[in-house]
Image (cartoon, helix red, strand yellow):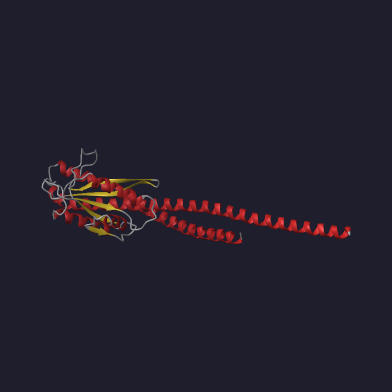
């Protein structure tokens, strides 16, 4: 029984140590989420403004021959840029992104190429015989612009070299702390925006063709950067919630183990009291027999 109590105490100490780790990870994830969430939300108007600008240029009839806007006559290879995390312990975050990619790939008859952003996605697809064409790992949690530009340049290089005829982004879009949604978005060829929403008209100087020549690569880089920001915010949110749930589970385990320890301790005390009472009763009976003689 004593050994059983010691075992329970060791388990309690172990779970408490785990809870300290999960609580620390939750606090770190919350701090990172606070920064990335603010950046992701504030950068959306810029991306929307670029979209409106591109729509106006297309409305003016320019860009029909631009290599980033002109669709291919035949799609030979489809490339999927899959944004996952480098580390685990983020709940269902990576699984949701990978499942979205698998559904998209299963629906395409053309050969598929993977551009992996994050070690989890790279390892997943490589383990299933689909080695990524390009891999980007070890990215900063703040979704730095230079890292997004590196990814965008690699994407445009593959597309312009005709190694990939269509490129899509698959990432987790950040809505709020408790809700993220996987997104499958076509990036290249750039889609001609639909009916333009009401907004200010842009003054184009020196001419629309020159502006589009500079705008198209920047638009690609902006889309990649925004996807990276959204993915990072969703990752930190998922990790914070996962560590919060893990801490709650640890608390429940500690309560259950403490109850088991108290029951075992009470059983020992009850047994010792019973033995004392039994021993005391035996001695009393012996004394009475002695006096009777």
Q: Quadrant of residue 137?
A: bottom left
Q: Position of residue 91 (x, y in %)?
A: 39, 51
Give the residue drawn at x 17%, y 55%: 158
Q: Quadrant of the C terminus?
A: bottom right
Q: Which quarter of the rendered picture does the N terminus lie within?
A: bottom right
- Which one is in front, 227 or 292? 292
Q: Is residue 176 left or right of residue 74?
A: right
Examine the image and state in which quarter residue 132 appears.
bottom left
Residue 48 showing in the rendered view: no
Q: Position of residue 27 (x, y in %)?
A: 44, 56
Q: Is residue 224 left or right of residue 275?
A: left
Residue located 28% across and 51% down the image? 227
Please identify the residue farthest to the front as the structure is shown. Answer: 293
Q: Position of residue 247 (x, y in %)?
A: 48, 53
- State left or right for residue 283 relative to residue 149: right
- Residue 245 screen position, x and y as percent: 45, 50
Quadrant in which residue 53 is drawn: top left
Q: Residue at x 82, y 59 (%)?
A: 286
Question: Which residue is more in the foreground, 196 or 193?
Answer: 193
In this picture, residue 22 sits left or right of residue 112: right
């Amino acid at each position: 029984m004593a050994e059983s109590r010691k075992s329970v105490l060791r388990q309690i100490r172990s779970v408490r140590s785990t809870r300290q780790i999960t609580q620390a990870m939750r606090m770190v994830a919350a701090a990172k989420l606070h920064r990335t969430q603010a950046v992701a939300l504030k950068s959306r108007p810029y991306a929307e403004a670029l979209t409106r600008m591109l729509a106006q240029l297309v409305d003016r009839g320019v860009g029909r021959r631009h290599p980033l806007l002109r669709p291919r006559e035949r799609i030979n290879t489809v490339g999927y840029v899959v944004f996952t995390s480098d580390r685990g312990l983020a709940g269902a975050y990576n699984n949701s992104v990978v499942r979205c990619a698998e559904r998209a790939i299963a629906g395409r008859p053309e050969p598929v190429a993977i551009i992996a952003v994050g070690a989890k996605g790279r390892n997943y697809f490589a383990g299933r015989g689909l080695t990524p064409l390009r891999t980007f790992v070890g990215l900063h949690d703040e979704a730095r612009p230079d890292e997004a530009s590196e990814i965008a340049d690699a994407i445009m290089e593959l597309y312009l070299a005709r190694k990939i005829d269509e490129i899509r982004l698959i990432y987790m879009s950040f809505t709020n702390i408790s809700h993220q949604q996987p997104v499958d978005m076509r990036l290249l060829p750039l889609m001609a925006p639909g009916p333009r929403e009401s907004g200010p008209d842009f003054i184009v100087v020196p001419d629309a063709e020159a502006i589009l020549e500079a705008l198209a690569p920047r638009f690609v880089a902006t889309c990649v950067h925004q996807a990276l920001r959204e993915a990072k915010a969703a990752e930190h949110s998922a990790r914070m919630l996962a560590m919060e749930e893990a801490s709650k589970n640890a608390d429940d385990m500690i309560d259950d183990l403490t109850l088991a320890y108290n029951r075992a301790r009470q059983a020992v005390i009850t047994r010792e009291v019973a033995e004392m009472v039994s021993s005391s009763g035996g001695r009393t009976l012996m004394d009475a027999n002695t006096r009777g003689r």
